[in-house]
Amino acid sequence: MKRAALGLVLVALATLPLWIGNEYYINIAAQILLYAVFALGMNVLVGYAGLVSLGHAGLFGIAAYAGAVVITSGGNHFVAIVTALAVTVGVAAAFAVLALRGTGLGFVMITVALGQIVWGVAYRWISITNGDNGVSITSRPSPFGLSLATASGFYWATLAVFLVALASIAILAASPFGASLRGTRDQPRRMTALGYNIWVIRFLAFVLSGFWSGVAGMLFLYYNQFISPQAVALSASAEALLMVIAGGTSTLLGPVVGAALVVIMKNVASAYIERWNFVLGAIFVAIVIFMPEGLVPGSARLGRWCLARLRRRAVPAPTAAAPRWEVGREVGPEAGSEVEP
Amino acid sequence: MNLWVVLGGNSIAFGGLLFLLSAGFALIFGLMRIPNLTHGSLFMMGAYFGVSLIGWGLGFWPAALLAALGVGAFGGLVERLLLRRLPGAELAQVLVTLGLSFMIADACLLGWGGDPLAIAAPSELHGSIRIAGFAFPLYRIVVIVVAVLIAAALWILIDRTRLGAMIRAGVDDPDIARVVGIRVSLLFTIVFSLGAGLAGFAGVIGGPILSVYPGLDQDMLPLALVVVILGGSGSLVGSFVGSFVVGFLYNFGQALFPELAYVVLFLPMLVVLVVRPQGLFGRAAP
């Protein structure tokens, strides 16, 4: 049953350009998949490792800039992609070493600072990044004879990358490494006592999420054929974080739902109102205040609660689950997680 | 030679301005453990308030004070209505303040437009004075004096008054502080308003130096962050020293390595983080 449903979804996704037809919507679908790759990568860190990063747009942007610079200086697409991903993984490793000096709030603050450095370099280092004007590339690659120049060609390539990302992260989450990663999030001290090297596990999670951010960055570069400091700004990191937490962290499909939600909202909202940033900010505040566990479980809970109110039965409203992404639980002597049940 | 002295003078003035901004950030972050990512927005909000108030015919200093009061009241509301609901949930506080900063930025863009606006320094401070043969703009000297005065006032408030003792008690052990009859929640609102008000005040004071433009918030927030990480959170001395260090790094970085100014700014912060994670003057984590 479950397999049949999965197969059906796959077929629907693969044939989407054929039954949608309209190029605008195919492009939006490609955008959703692109950002879903980004959100999936971030979720490795935010959801499974419980480390909240506000600097991942920096990694996303580094990949795009590196790829764009290689291409504009005459390299072919294969070289560009390999270089971009290698640079991104290297930078992600360096960022991880620095950011993992802190946990909880310190980690967030350091990633903000690191992201701002990348932004500052992109904005100011005009001889390489062309400053505010950004870097343009003129062509998309055509791997295995499939031209990505058309909307549906690009959609299929993005879908393939998305499926690889989804599958590899699903395997990772189910693997012993995934279990130990969640262990470092929930019970860091016990994990240490059990002989796990928490630092190494977190480091690997950071680098892996950096890698997928880089992949998404390359897709972004090819989608827009353009990269500018706008894509590296703090608000871009915040948008990605919103995707992860909106869908529900540390679930496999949460980030995908979140990415779809944000991309659709952004496209729909910007068609009617100019003030996307205001809407984004308001959604942030509303989600944190009203649905701390994420939009998907949260709206289900609100729906149940409203139904119960409507029917006026004596059903007690289910209480909100404690948000799983609360940072800083491990610090302080009063951390309840260490109390034996 | 002349260039270096002028650059040094500007650095000190900018450091003073940064202290006004980051003292509030250090108080809120260090004492209340709230990562207030709206701080840059509060600075910008103060600056825009100042523009309007001066436009309505108010003098510079009354406008600065009124803007500080307005931003402080706004900060108090934010603390009461939003942050109060999220005690100890630091990530939730990060997200709410970040969301709010987007909303403020967009509202300011709507209200005051996208063009940079200038705030004129008060006319009696337009000239320059000569110190040891070098001319310094009078206004920047005044900024330094104001920053030092406010630093002293804050130090006396936190270290020497009954209110300060109550704030420190409320931070160290809120439960016991409540038991002995201190209204901790009111104190936290006061601290948050005070920090917000300082940021708003700094926005107006900084107006003649920086002018006001969309994106000012995103320019100032990282600076406040660097100051507090450098100096150590919760330490007024730390943010005082950190402000001037960052003032120098920022100005000299801009002048000497304009393309890498941001790297020059953040590199020392990263070195401090690696060598001494609690910051230069911060207390080690318990």
Image: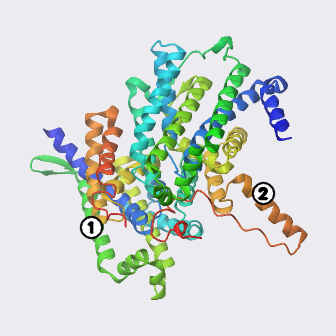
Residue at image position (71%, 23%) is A156
- Label 1, secondary structure: give it: helix
The residue type indicated by label 2 comes to Ala
Residue at image position (72%, 57%) is A298
Q: Which residue is mark 1?
A: B149
The spot of residue B133 in percent (x, y) is 9, 47
The spot of residue A267 in percent (x, y) is 70, 37
Asked whether the viewer can see residue A224, the reply is yes
Q: Residue furthest front?
A: A194
Residue at image position (50%, 65%) is B75
Name the disc covering residue A300, or none: 2
Residue at image position (64%, 64%) is A322
Q: Residues within 10 Å of mark 2 (few under 14, many from 20)?
A: few
Q: Disc 1 and disc 2: Cα gap in Å?
A: 54 Å
Chain ID, mark 2: A
- Label 2, secondary structure: give it: helix
The spot of residue B168 in percent (x, y) is 38, 76
Q: Is residue A309 above or below residue B126?
A: below
What's the image's color scheme?
A: rainbow
Q: Residues within 10 Å of mark 1 (few under 14, many from 20)?
A: few
